[in-house]
Amino acid sequence: MNELSNDILLYRAISKKRWIDPENGVIQPVAFELRFRQKTQQYERGVSCDLTPNLCYQYIDKCFGIIELSVGDVRALGLEVDNDHDSHVNIINFPNPDLEEKEYELILDKLAQKARLYQNWLDNPRSR
């Protein structure tokens, strides 16, 4: 797909309430954790995002809000954005959570700090 410029915004659906601090709306690092797949015994390749807010939650049962961050913020942390479809992207090149635990946790913290709460639906989640 096309190379994305640093000013492009990414949107990530908040599928778990614990991804946001309900008191102050701060994004938690857990929102960017790579999921471990039991079937393959490996972590996912990246963290899923979309290029438009209304598409980021179309495949989940319940959405508690939307996270926004820029491609430039992601790249500044040494990560990359893989534009694998017209509107879908993955944040990739995370440190290995098992072999580089401290670096991985630091990246999660920094992503959470860069992220902004674009839409808050904690009290009234959107359903598919």
Image (cartoon, helix red, strand yellow):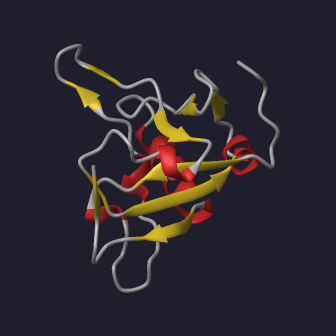
Is 19 located above or below residue 24 in the figure? above
For the N terminus, give its image quadrant. top right
Q: Is residue 68 left or right of residue 22?
A: right
Question: Could you tell me which residue is drawn at 51 percent across and 59 percent down?
Answer: 67
State the residue in front, 106 or 57. 57
Task: Give the camera-side residue of 104 and 45.
Answer: 45
Q: Position of residue 60 (x, y in %)?
A: 29, 44
Which quadrant of the structure image shows residue 127? bottom left
Quadrant for residue 24, please give it: bottom left
Position of 38 with respect to 108 (left or right) is: left
The residue at the far bottom in this view is 23
Q: In percent of the image, x 57 and y 64: which residue is there?
A: 113
Q: Is residue 88 left or right of residue 56?
A: right
Q: Residue at x 40, y 47 (%)?
A: 57
* Image position, residue 98 (x, y; %): 35, 31
Tell me: residue 121, above or below residue 89.
Answer: below
Residue 12 spot, x, y in % from top left: 48, 49
Residue at x 23% of width, y 13% of height: 40
The one nearer the camera, 43 or 22, is 22
